[in-house]
Image (cartoon, helix red, strand yellow):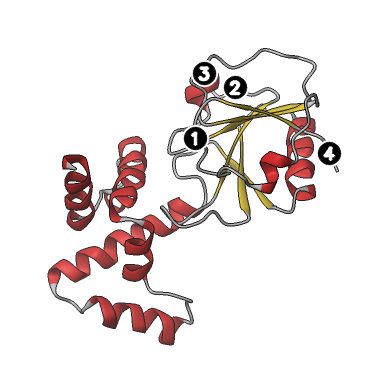
């Protein structure tokens, strides 16, 4: 198992207090995991095989800076996927830049896999892989609901029984939190300008209500 050390600057969306991953950290290791955002400047330590920055909706470049498509080092980003406010899954999206160190990617992958996670590597793009795929579907379902195309129950049943999904789009996005969906969709829309990521009305309303509380 590859050793890792943790520096935590605030609450982590990937690892709640008491998570086994937190308990498994060492006091010194050549893989450094930064949790809770990087409220402080990224440490410069050439001795580390990999420095991993936990991401929320932002790109890794926000923390490292960018250099005309030549950015990259042993600093990588990651996020443990979770459906909004649902419990985190065992999937880690590992974020690389164009010139990221291949040895850093390998070290990070081995470390997470040894800790029991599945790892996918993706480019430093808004929404990474899963949110880029699913957020337009949730927005479309919410707009269909507003337009009266079908009830929430009918759409969810169609996806479960007709497509074999474990749950439907409305129940899934509501379970994860419409306000959280609004935040994620808006972040991707702001960086891509693609209409499919513009938060649906119900998500905007949920964010506004939560902000008023």
Report if the CB atoms under discs 3 and 4 are less than 8 Å apart.
no
Which mark is first along the chain, 4 or 3? 4
**Which residue is disc 3 drawn over?**
65
**Which residue is disc 1 drawn over?**
11
Name which quarter of the figure residue 212 lies in. top left
Left or right of 51: which side holds 9?
Answer: left
Which mark is first along the chain, 3 or 2? 3
**Which residue is disc 2 drawn over?**
71
Packing grade of label 2 (10 A; few <14, some 14-19, many >=20) is some
**Which residue is disc 4 drawn over?**
2
**3 vs 4, front mark:** 4
Disc 3 is placed on an element classified as loop
Residue 2 spot, x, y in % from top left: 83, 38
Residue 164 spot, x, y in % from top left: 48, 82
The N terminus lies in quadrant: top right
**4 vs 2, front mark:** 4
Distance (Cα) linking label 2 and label 3? 8 Å
Q: Residue furthest left?
A: 147
Disc 2 is placed on an element classified as loop
Disc 4 is placed on an element classified as loop
**3 vs 1, front mark:** 1
Distance (Cα) linking label 3 and label 1? 23 Å
Which mark is first along the chain, 2 or 1? 1
Report if the CB atoms under discs 2 and 3 are less than 8 Å apart.
yes
Which mark is first along the chain, 4 or 1? 4
């Amino acid at each position: 198992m590859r050793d890792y050390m943790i520096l935590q600057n605030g609450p982590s969306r990937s690892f709640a207090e008491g998570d086994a991953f937190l308990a498994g950290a060492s006091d010194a290791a050549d893989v450094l995991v930064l949790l809770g955002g990087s409220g402080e400047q990224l440490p410069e330590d050439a001795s580390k095989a990999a420095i991993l920055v936990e991401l929320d909706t932002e790109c890794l470049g926000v923390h490292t800076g960018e250099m005309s498509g030549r950015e990259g080092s042993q600093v990588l980003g990651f996020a443990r996927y979770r459906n909004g406010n649902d419990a985190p899954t065992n999937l880690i999206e590992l974020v690389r830049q164009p010139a990221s160190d291949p040895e850093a990617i390998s070290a990070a992958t081995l470390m997470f896999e040894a800790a029991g996670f599945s790892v996918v590597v993706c480019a430093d793009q808004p929404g990474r892989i899963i949110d880029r795929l699913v957020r337009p579907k949730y927005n479309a379902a919410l707009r269909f609901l507003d337009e009266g195309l079908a009830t929430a129950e009918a759409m969810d049943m169609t996806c479960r029984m007709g497509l074999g999904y474990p749950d439907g789009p409305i129940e899934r996005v509501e379970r994860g939190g419409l306000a959280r969906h609004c935040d994620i969709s808006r972040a991707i829309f702001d960086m891509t300008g693609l209409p499919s990521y513009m938060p649906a009305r119900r998500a905007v309303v949920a964010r506004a209500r939560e902000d008023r509380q």
